[in-house]
Amino acid sequence: MQFMLQFSLNNMEILNSLAGGGGIYVQVQFTEQPQNKNEVQDMLDFYRPYKLNQISVNKMSIYHEGGSVLMDNLKGKDYEVGTCSAYGAYIVLTDGSVVGCCDEVHIYPKLRDKIPNIFETSLEECKKQSDFLYLNDATFINYCKNCSLYDFFDLNATAKKSINNGYLEISSKVQTRYFVVPEYLSSIPEDVLLFMYENNMVSAIKNFKKGLSHGTDVN
Ligand code: SF4
C-alpha cells in the first residue's frame, strides 16, 4: 500500500526522522516550472544530507479540456489503445468512484454515469468496468490520445545515467530522478562509480551493508 506524506521544506524534525529508512520509502517530487527552474540545484543541495530514497524533477503538464500536454510541447509516440503503462493503478475516490489511473480524474465529469462505484459493487467488478471503459469508451480513448502521462512513459524509455554532485542522475526528456550516492562510495571516481551503477554492483553492495547492520538502512 502506498501513502503520500506531505510536509514543508523546512520541517527538519520530520526529515531527520525519515532519513535513513525504517522501511519507509521517501521520495520528493519537484515539478519544474518556468518560475522555479533555477531552484533545482538548491533543492538538491538542501536534501542531500537527508539521504532520501529518491528525488524526481518532473516537467510540468498543462491540462485542457481534451487532454494534457507536457511543457515544451514534448510528444511521445501515438497512442495505441490498451498500451498505457500508467493504467491499472486504480484509485478509489472519496465518493466511492473507482478510476484506473490518476489522469482519468480529468475526464471524470464526462464519464460520470459510467464510472463504477465501490459503494454499489465489489472492487473486482469496479476494476472490470473500469477496464472496459479504458478499452472501449470513445471519450476515454480520445482523452488518452492527448494525455501527457502516456507521453511521459514513452519519453522516459531513453533515460540516461550520470553522476552529478553526489547523486546518481537518471534523466530523460520529461523527468530527472536523483538517488544519493552512499557516503562509503563517494570517493570512487565518477566513471568507475557509473560503471558500478550500470552493472547493479551498487545495489549488491548496499544489500551487503544492510545485512552487516542487521536490517538497518545505511544508504
Ligand atoms: S493515457 Fe492517460 S488517461 Fe489514458 S490510461 Fe494512460 S494515464 Fe490514463
Image (cartoon, rainbow, N blue to C red):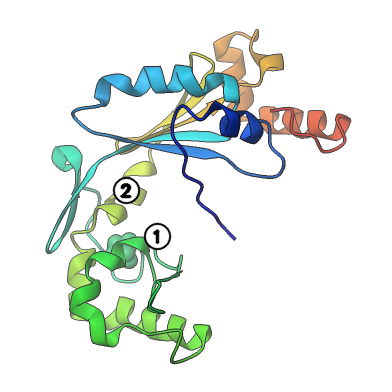
Residue, x 73% and y 30% (percent of image)? Answer: 206
* Ligand 1's quadrant: bottom left
Which quadrant is home to the N terminus? bottom right
Camera-side residue: 5 or 124?
5
Residue furthest toward the left? 65
Vertical side of 97 occupied by 23: above or below: above
Snapshot quadrant of residue 129: bottom left
The residue type indicated by label 1 comes to Ala
Report the residue marked by disc 1: 86
Q: How packed is label 2: few (under 14 Cα within 10 Å), some, or many (20 or more)?
A: many
Q: How packed is label 1: few (under 14 Cα within 10 Å), some, or many (20 or more)?
A: some
- Residue 80: x and y in percent read 28, 66
The residue type indicated by label 2 comes to Phe
Q: Are marks 2 and 1 in contact (CB under 8 Å)?
A: yes
Residue, x 40% and y 60% (percent of image)? Answer: 86
Measured Cα–Cα span from mark 2 to mark 1 = 9 Å
Residue, x 80% and y 33% (percent of image)? Answer: 210
* Side (left or right) of 155 relative to 203: left
Mark 2 residue element: helix
Q: Tell me the number on the disc at residue 57.
A: none
- Residue 111: x and y in percent read 23, 80
Which quadrant is home to the C terminus? top right
Camera-side residue: 148 or 16?
16
Res. 163 visible in picture: no
Report the residue marked by disc 2: 152
* Side (left or right) of 67 relative to 167: left
* Side (left or right) of 154 relative to 144: right
- Residue 214: x and y in percent read 87, 36
Camera-side residue: 163 or 65?
65
Tell me which label, 2 or 1, sits earlier in the chain. Answer: 1
Mark 1 residue element: loop
Ligand 1 is within 8 Å of the C-beta of the residue at disc 1: yes
